[in-house]
Image: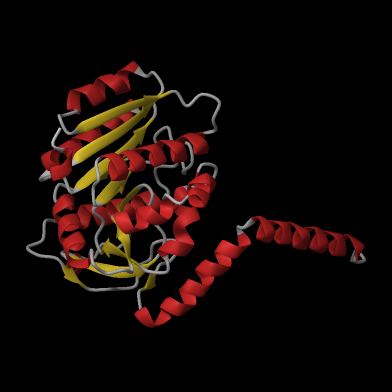
Amino acid sequence: MKSQTFKGAFVLATYQRPEILSKVLQAIYGADNSSIYNKVIIFQGNDEKSLEIINHFKDEATILVRVSGKDKSPLENITNNYLMGLEIAFEYLAVDYVIEVEDDSVIAPHTLEFIDQIFEKYKSNRKFRGINLGSYENRQELIGTYSLLRTGFHATHGVIVKRSWKYISRRRITTRIRTSPLDSTVEPYWKTGFSVTPNLSLCENFGWLNGTHASNDSKDIHYKSISASFQAQTRPKKWNELTIEHTWNPNPRKYRWVDNWKFQIYYLMDVVKKTHTGIKIGESIKVTKSSLKQRLPKK
């Protein structure tokens, strides 16, 4: 495997979702220039149909890792599987960025072209945290444009650059992620910089299909909005920055460098809160509030 010549890699964790897995892998392996990207697939369980689908698509650039997931909660399995995939990609394959796609999301054929252009343009910027591929906007005039946003990481379909991996791979962060969602854990750090987001979605999500942590209603506004945006996307001649207000929930903010100091303070406050001492203080405050509430006369 010519791993050192590859600049990027896909990381996909999957568990018994054959009803959508074939479509997800078709989008990944069928994307333009996909053959020069590594694919790290963490396959949990023993579902023979899923394994058959993976074996049908995998190429010489694919690394397949099988895990049992026994005695762990769904959240622990999701986070542990992705951490394993990220470590393989960044530490063993030595890639510059990872495209994380969950097994219920598909990407547009020209997604890798967009990612490559954005990475080349912003890779030297210390505030560049990565790329989110999802959007709710669907106006045709937004074709070929993207925004610089101060927002969290879209764990279902996003790109993590090596600089951000160095933060994630710190022991205290990986320890926290193993029992907490990756996106919410890293959000305070992510917001100290910017994520690039296409103004029209480059992915579509089918999280209602046998999911573990998302709405099981196919008519949920999240799925409908991202699908409408995805359907509005066509291959642009070139990509240009046009930072707009996005309606993604929770609402991201336009990135302005003058606000960096403010979000750096928020990040440091979050760090303090999650130290051993900070947790103890937080627990004491909760106990005090509860005690005071019990003492107040009932109306």
**Image quadrant assignment for residue 90:** top left
Q: Nearer the viewer, residue 24 or 186?
A: 186
Q: Nearer the viewer, residue 33 or 295?
A: 33
Q: What x and y, as percent, mark residue 162?
A: 30, 54
Residue farthest to the bottom, as pictured: 258
**Image quadrant assignment for residue 37:** top left
- Answer whether residue 102 is visible to the viewer in this image: no
- Answer whether residue 287 is visible to the viewer in this image: yes
What residue do we see at 49% from left, 48% from top?
A: 171
Which quarter shows the N terminus?
top left
Q: Nearer the viewer, residue 281 or 12?
A: 281
**Image quadrant assignment for residue 71:** top right
Which quarter shows the C terminus?
bottom right
Q: What x and y, as percent, mark residue 229?
A: 27, 57
Q: Is residue 209 left or right of residue 55?
A: right
Q: Is residue 289 left or right of residue 227?
A: right
What residue do we see at 51% from left, 67% from top?
A: 267
